[in-house]
Structures are given as structure tokens and as C-alpha cells.
Image (tube, rainbow, N blue to C red):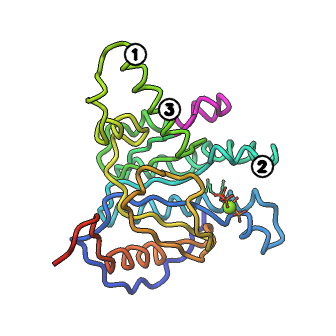
Amino acid sequence: MFFKKKREIEYDLDMNNIPQHIAFIMDGNGRWAKKRKMPRTYGHHEGTKTIRTLALEANRLGVKAMTVYAFSTENFKREASEVDYIFKLPKEFFQLYLKELMDNDVSIRYIGHLEMAPLETRRIIEEAVSQTSRNHGLILTFAFIYGGRDEIVEATKIICEEYKHGQISLDDINEDYFEKHLMTKDLPPVDLMVRSSGEKRLSNFLLWQLAYAEFVFDDTLWPDFDEERLHYAIAVYQGRERRFGGVVK
Ligand code: IPE
Ligand code: IPE
Ligand code: MG
């Protein structure tokens, strides 16, 4: 098996200021393949290697959580053949890398409507989640059939049910309470959001959670994104001043 050779990493990272939670919009697989006159699916295939590379490196750096946008609720607009291919990738990914991720104490989770995926895909992902549930390293979350607006609507519905059944009063509903009903409820706050491929939009990703995250947009296409670009994004993050609406003296 061949993996990309590590490039020289030259950013002087402050190990006391590593983002706890990094969220990636993995974009540019199709364009990466097109540049090589290959089908878009080949780009998706190559893009999964980047997830492995970044998860291992993020884990090594002490990042607590990494969330990757793997399939959006809007991605069903694509051709069925491409959608079917993407739904087969978890099997390939976990066959190749689950053992290594396990050995590195990585814990797998997902957010999104996994119940809409084919049975085999669901089984594979659920199996990876359960096998790694006692690990304490990086939490690697796949946003799969995920949409930020949908997540907010779903949380609202759960809270409405609670209200309807008299379990809570209106005064119980506040930002903290709402957040506990999101799919990300057990994850730390997102500190850094990175989107590859040069597009500068959120495409319905983690709309609530990104309210105060730092954004880094990188022109690299996802299959080419590597440890060096991760270090660069963290270096940019460390150069930012986070104010959360306050004033830094
Ligand atoms: C990201 O790459 C992967 C998914 C959205 C599933 P794209 O497939 O969006 O690649 P481009 O943007 O067309 O290059
Ligand atoms: C966002 O990328 C979704 C994922 C990375 C899974 P898209 O390529 O689907 O987003 P748009 O269409 O460019 O906004
Ligand atoms: Mg895209």
C-alpha cells in the first residue's frame, strides 16, 4: 500500500493552543479527478485517504475531535451512480483503516440521517462506532447525510415534543438547552473550520456550531490536502485573535 510521502512541515505550532475540534468541508474530489481525466468517483476514492492521514495527524497533535462533511442532505441531487459510489466508501475506508485507527485509540462517530443509507453502509458505520466506542483518542465524526438546517429543525421537534408532554416549560429553553439536542451534543465546541478546494461557503454545514469558529479556506483540492496543509491551517488559527464578542485588552 502506498501513502503520500510526508512533506516537510515547517510551521512552528504552539502545542498549548491546538484547536480542540476541527471541522472539515472535504471539497474538490470531483475537480481533482477531472484534472486527471478520471471519473469523479476516483476523486472520492482518493479523498478517503486524506481522512486517514489527517485523523492520524490530528490525533498525534492532541486535537480532541475532527468532524468531516462526507455527504450533505443536498448531495442527493447528484447522479445516482455517484451517490451509490459514495455510499460504498465507508466499507472500503473501514476495511483499510479501522484497525489502524483502533490502534491509535481513535473513536468513530457519525451525525446525520444514517437511516437513509443502504443497510450495508449503515451496518459498517455502526460497527465501526461500536468497536471504537471505548477509545479515548481523537473523536472522528462523519457528517453523513447531514444538513445543518435539518439538524436545527430536528432539535426543535424533539424540544416541542418535550414541551407538549409537559416535561419542560418555555423558560427551560435556552441556548444551552437547545445545543444539548443537536447531533453534536457530546462533542467539544468547533474551534476551526477548514474548507478545501477554494470554495468560500458553508454549504449547510454545522450552522449552529460554527457561530464562533475560525474559518480557513484553502485552495488545495481534498485528495491533495495533507499534514502540511493541516499544520498551515492550525498556524493560521493560532494567529487569529478570538474575541467572542468581547474586547481583548
Ligand atoms: C466533495 O467533493 C465530496 C462530496 C461533496 C461528497 P465534490 O464531489 O464536491 O468535488 P467538486 O466540488 O465537484 O470538485
Ligand atoms: C459540501 O460540498 C458537501 C460536502 C463536502 C459533503 P458540495 O460540493 O456539495 O457543496 P457546494 O454544492 O459546492 O455548495
Ligand atoms: Mg464540491
In this picture, residue 201 sits left or right of residue 45: left
Nearest to the eye among marks 1 and 3: give it. 1
Looking at the magenta stretch, what is its main secondary structure?
helix
* Marking on residue 25: none
Give the structural element (helix, strand or loop) at label 3. helix
Verify CB contact (< 8 Å) between mark 2 and mark 3: no
The local crowd at label 2, few if under 14, some if 14 to 19, many if 20 or more residues have their Cα within 10 Å, is few
Quarter of the view holding residue 17: bottom left
Q: Is residue 43 above or below residue 7?
A: above
Q: Is residue 245 above or below residue 153?
A: below
In this picture, residue 211 sits left or right of residue 39: left
Q: Is mark 2 within 8 Å of ligand 1?
A: yes
Q: Is residue 34 above or below residue 87?
A: below
Q: Which residues are magenta?
A: 112-125
Residue 118 image offset from top left, x and y in percent: 68, 31
Camera-side residue of 196 and 118: 196
Nearest to the eye among marks 1 and 2: give it. 1
Picture residue at 57% right of the left edge, 34% below the top? 113
Q: Farthest residue toward the left?
A: 249
